[in-house]
Image: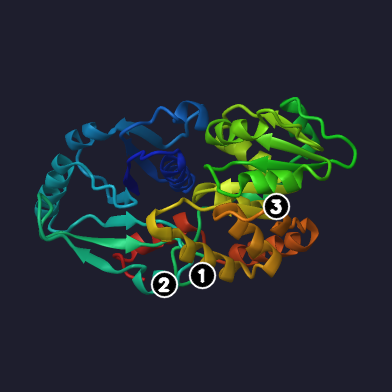
Amino acid sequence: MRWDVFCKVIDNHGDLGVCWRLATQLAGRGDTVRLWVDDGSALAWMAPHGCEGVQVGNWLQAAQCEPADAVVEAFGCDPPAAFLAGLARTTRSRGAQPPWVNLEYLSAEPWVERCHGLPSPVLAGPAAGLQKHFFHPGFSPATGGLLREGQLMERRRRFSREAWLREFGIQPAPGERVVSLFCYEPPGLAAVLSRLAAAPTLLLVTAGRAQSALRPWLQGRQPGLLRIHQLPLLAQPDFDHLLWSCDFNFVRGEDSLVRALWAGRPFAWNIYPQEDGAHLPKLDAFLDWLGAPASLRQLHRAWNVGLPAGQVSLDLSAWAAVSREARARLLAQADLAGELRRFVAAGCRR
């Protein structure tokens, strides 16, 4: 199949990261993908070698091309009006509309299963009279699943933690736990770092907002038993390797949450903050699905809302089993790219 995938980069790299993974996984199944993006500059470090079968194009240039066999708009980004006018013309000339899918944000909330696959008639604009369908990623077989490469677990089994750490000049000391930090500006940052500093810990800090958030905490402070290593920007495969190399991972947003689940290591999620605390029920729904014990729930509350350091516990051994069990459940389900292909091939019927 031929796909048009539309992506707008809002304020972080997650939207583009998700779309690039989707595009490459469709290409890995023999499809061809045109990824239309308004700012693809991050791909220079996120995917420096590109991918056979994936062509990256400027958002506005999409209008010059005839629509492909299927159209995906990521996260309700609204493709350019000129492209949608072309989609309407293609529909009239072919006598059938190419499938048009709105790839939604990830959530474990119960309504996702009800809304997955529902049609949405377009009532106005150049595509009036056409129809798109909601496609919801999720954690159950009644959703669209999660992005997962076909050989991911085999790649995971062959991975050498020691070799990868050595490649980046990282040498954990004997008895030192290794923790990754990929976050926004979580309210519980100071409290959690104080707890980490109570035991020998090597903190691998990702480039960008995590390093910026850490800087004020370090000023004028002795970090105790916390040793800090600043990382460069990482390509997507190396970000996976980072998560596989650590005893605990702090992740953020959507893409890195999914990668933490595939890593099978204990983790804490810095959910994207929304006004009026609208993100907190979404966090609770995920922790319910995960089967998180009370201590892990408390850590997430501290990380995302803020609690004193004395109310933060780090029970890595107990949380490891939770992560492995969650991964096993997900591996028994279909992956998102495969489900999307099946959904489109079935005429957007579940």
* Residue that badge 2 annotates: 113
Instruction: For marks 2 and 1, give the CA distance.
Output: 8 Å
Sequence order check, earlier mark of 1 and 3: 1
Q: Secondary structure at mark 3?
A: helix
From the viewer's perspective, tell me whether residue 165 is left or right of residue 31: right
Give the image location of residue 231, x and y in percent. 64, 29
Label 1 crowd (10 A; few <14 / some 14-19 / many >=20): some
Quadrant of the image occupied by residue 80: top left
Instruction: Indicate which label's residue lies in the foreground, 3 or 2.
Output: 3
- The CA span between labels 1 and 3 is 35 Å
Q: Residue at x 69, y 28 (%)?
A: 220
SS at circle 1: loop
Tag 3: residue type? Ala
The image quarter containing residue 116 is: bottom left
Q: Nearer the viewer, residue 189 or 38?
A: 189
Q: Quadrant of residue 16?
A: top left
User: Which residue: 55% across, 31% down?
Assistant: 212
Q: Residue 155, can we see it? A: no
- Residue 128 at x, y = what percent? 10, 56
Q: How many marks?
A: 3
- Give the mark nearest the N terminus, 2 or 1: 2
* Mark found first going from the N terminus, 3 or 2: 2
Disc 1 residue type (three-letter): Ser
Q: Are dots 2 and 1 in contact, CB under 8 Å?
A: yes
Identify which residue is drawn at 23% across, 36% down. 62
Question: Does residue 87 appear left or right of residue 194 in this picture?
Answer: left
Q: CA distance from mark 3 to mark 2?
A: 37 Å
Amino acid under disc 2: Glu
Q: Which residue is mark 3?
A: 309
